[in-house]
Each structure stands twice: as structure tokens, then as C-alpha cells.
Amino acid sequence: MQRPRSGLIALSIFFALGALIAAVTAIALLASGGPLEPIWRLNPQAHVVFLAIGPWAPVVMAGVATACALSAIGLWIRAPWGHRLALVLLVVNLAGDATNAVVRRDLRTLIGLPIAGALIFYLLSARVRGQFRTTDAAA
């Protein structure tokens, strides 16, 4: 069976970048007014939402960073838990985008639906799932 290397490598990098972005966000929230403050110009609405969450915002973002980093590692090493974690994160992202489109009437978030859907479809394909099967010896 041919390994779908490039797709899983790309997805690992995608989650690693997500981890980096979430970690920078958590640090920027903790160091308000610091050298990372200009990042909020990229998405001022996000800053307002994070400020409304209060002291839990950096904790949430640190959790997101950790989950993304673990997913990146798990996909990279072809661990079954990494496959499951990536699927969970993508489903949560898809639900969040759909919720934002409906509740906040932010139609820009709809772009995430086909992207997350395609990534979920890819991860659920038999060819990719086969990369995460454990052997009896490893179990």
C-alpha cells in the first residue's frame, strides 16, 4: 500500500502552525500591551471576544495550542490517537464555523466548512486510515 505521505505531512504542518498561532495568541493575551500587541490589527474582533472571555482566554488558547501540537505529532508519527485527535479538532472547528455563521451572522466563516469537511473526508478515507492501524504486537 502506498503511503499518503505528502497529505499527512501537510496536515501535520497545518496543525503545527495552528499550535504556533494559538500559542502566540495566548502569550499576546497574557502580555497585554507588550510587543505582540500589534497582532490584534489582523483580527480586532477576535481581540474583543478574547477580552470578553477574561482570564480564561489565554488558558483556552494554551489548550488549543497543546491539542494542535499533539495532533501534529500524532499525525507525523502515524499514531492512532493522533488520527482521532485530528478528527475531533476538525469536527469542533467545523461546528464552530457553522455556529459563527448562524449566531454571529458572519458568513466569512462559511469558507471553513468545505475546508474542514474535505480534511475530515481525507482522514476518514480507507487509504489514510490504513496508515494508523496498530498491529497486535504494538497493541
Image (cartoon, rainbow, N blue to C red):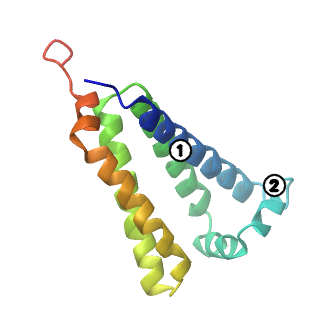
Category of crowding for the residue at label 2, using alpha-carbon neighbours closer than 10 angstroms: few (below 14), some (14–19), many (at least 20): some
On screen, residue 138 versus residue 73, left or right, reads left
Category of crowding for the residue at label 1, using alpha-carbon neighbours closer than 10 angstroms: few (below 14), some (14–19), many (at least 20): some
Q: Which numbered circle lies on residue 23?
A: none
Kind of residue indicated by mark 2: Leu
Write down the residue under mark 2.
36
Q: Secondary structure at mark 2?
A: loop
Kind of residue indicated by mark 1: Phe
Q: Nearer the viewer, mark 1 or mark 2?
A: 1
Determine the residue positioned at 64% across, 50% down: 21
Determine the residue positioned at 21% across, 28% down: 133
Give the x, y percent position of residue 40: 76, 66
Quadrant assignment, res 37: bottom right
Write down the residue under mark 1.
14
Tell me the CA gap for discs 1 and 2.
Answer: 22 Å
Give the x, y percent position of residue 137: 16, 12
Tell me, yes or no, if residue 74 can be seen here.
Answer: yes
